[in-house]
Amino acid sequence: MAAFTEAILDQMESILSLGLSTKLDALDTEYDDGIVLEDPILYFKGRKFQVSQTPAVILWPDSAPGDEYASEDSLKLEYRIISYIVISSETDAEKMWIRIFRYLRGMTEVIRATHNLEGAVDICKFGGFIFESPWLAVRENTYIAIAGVVWNISDEEIL
């Protein structure tokens, strides 16, 4: 269905770039506490260790172990993709983490609303959150936070 990893990442980026802004505005309105969620400036598909602008969404293909042949011309694959959010703040680390938690909620609700990435895959399941990342981010007088949503995706891929 999805034509392997690239098409899945393209679909996730499309869904997030079209729906996340509206969801973030709704969360700002719901909480109404002055903590504002900015729209992501950058979407990146693949493994990226340096981010020059924040907030940024990185769609990180974590693993894609093969499962079995579904038929002689298709494979059943199980993907694990993490949608990371990277943000920075020069003022308040606690408020920055509140923003991270809300970005995670927003990404989760936008992707989960599709159930199967709008038909691009067979199943897209929420797999939890990650609060550690492959990055060590240090900048003078700036707090940087990175967290992600894990997505477990099942799809039959035509060979």
Image (cartoon, rainbow, N blue to C red):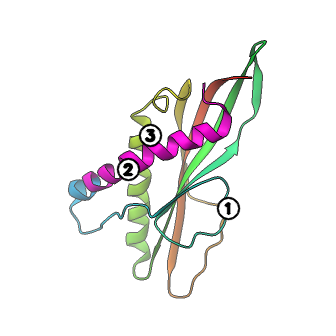
Side of 31 relative to 149 (left or right) = left
Side of 62 relative to 25 (left or right) = right
**Where's residue 5, x and y in %?**
66, 39
Quarter of the image that includes the N terminus: top right
Mark 3 or 1: in front is: 3
Q: Is residue 88 visible?
A: yes
Q: Is residue 23 on the magenta stretch?
A: yes
* Circle count: 3
Mark 3 neighbour density, 10 Å: few (under 14) some (14–19) many (20 or more): many
Q: Which residue is mark 1?
A: 134
Sequence order check, earlier mark of 3 and 1: 3
Q: Secondary structure at mark 2?
A: helix
Which amino acid, by three-letter code, is at mark 3?
A: Ile
Q: Which residue is mark 2?
A: 20
Sequence order check, earlier mark of 3 and 2: 2
Q: Secondary structure at mark 3?
A: helix
Q: Nearer the viewer, residue 152 or 18?
A: 18
Mark 2 neighbour density, 10 Å: few (under 14) some (14–19) many (20 or more): many
Look at 56% across and 58% down and name the residue there: 131
**Where's residue 7, x and y in %?**
60, 37
Mark 2 or 1: in front is: 2
Look at 50% across and 87% down and name the residue there: 141
Q: Looking at the picture, does residue 6 appear above or below residue 47? A: above
Q: Quadrant of residue 140?
A: bottom right
Q: Which residues are magenta?
A: 1-26
Q: Main secondary structure of the magenta part?
A: helix
Determine the CA span between mark 3 and mark 2.
9 Å
Quarter of the image that includes the C terminus: top right
Q: Which residue is mark 3?
A: 111
